[in-house]
Image (tube, helix red, strand yellow):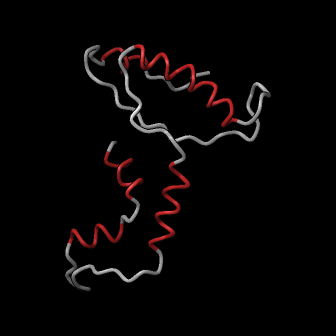
Amino acid sequence: MIEHLNDEALRKLPDDAPVVMLNLMRFREKSLDGNGSGWDAYLRYSRLTITLIKAQGGTIIWAGDAEAKINAELIAAQGKKVDTGGYYLPDPAKASAAMRPSATLNAAIAAL
């Protein structure tokens, strides 16, 4: 099932260093096993996987539907006046904040 696993890169990783993962996924309308949707299958998988991750000392920092939250944050920012500190020479911090209004998306990008 795994077609693009980089075995060589995985073997080179140190055993005593933390692993950080960000999984961005889309789900099938129907699961491959025929038991509900792709989301339902993922929830079944997660229940088993989370137990294994925690047994090895791992921590799940966040799990949820980021797409809906990010969309809501981006939509809420639409059409509002924004102070960028100037038109020709905007303040970089103000311009960056105005152009990246989703705290959820910003956190995901920062974690990469």
Q: Quadrant of the C terminus?
A: top left
- The image quadrant that residue 7 belongs to is top left
Q: Position of residue 39 (x, y in %)?
A: 66, 37
Q: Is residue 110 above or below residue 13?
A: below
Instruction: State the residue at coordinates (44%, 19%).
Output: 53
Q: Is residue 104 left or right of residue 36?
A: left
Q: Position of residue 93 (x, y in %)?
A: 22, 68
Q: Is residue 44 left or right of residue 29?
A: left
Q: Is residue 94 above or below residue 8?
A: below
Q: How many marks?
A: 0
Q: Position of residue 108 (x, y in %)?
A: 39, 47
- The image quadrant that residue 35 belongs to is top right
Instruction: State the residue at coordinates (48%, 57%).
Output: 70
- The image quadrant that residue 38 belongs to is top right
Instruction: State the residue at coordinates (43%, 37%).
Output: 22
Instruction: State the residue at coordinates (47%, 75%).
Output: 78
Residue sticking out furthest to the right = 34
Q: Is residue 98 above or below residue 58?
A: below
Q: Is residue 103 above or below residue 79?
A: above
Please state which of residues 11 and 36 is positioned toward the viewer in this rendering.
36
Q: Is residue 70 left or right of residue 44?
A: left
Q: Position of residue 82 (x, y in %)?
A: 34, 80
Residue sticking out furthest to the bottom = 87
Q: Quadrant of the N terminus?
A: top right
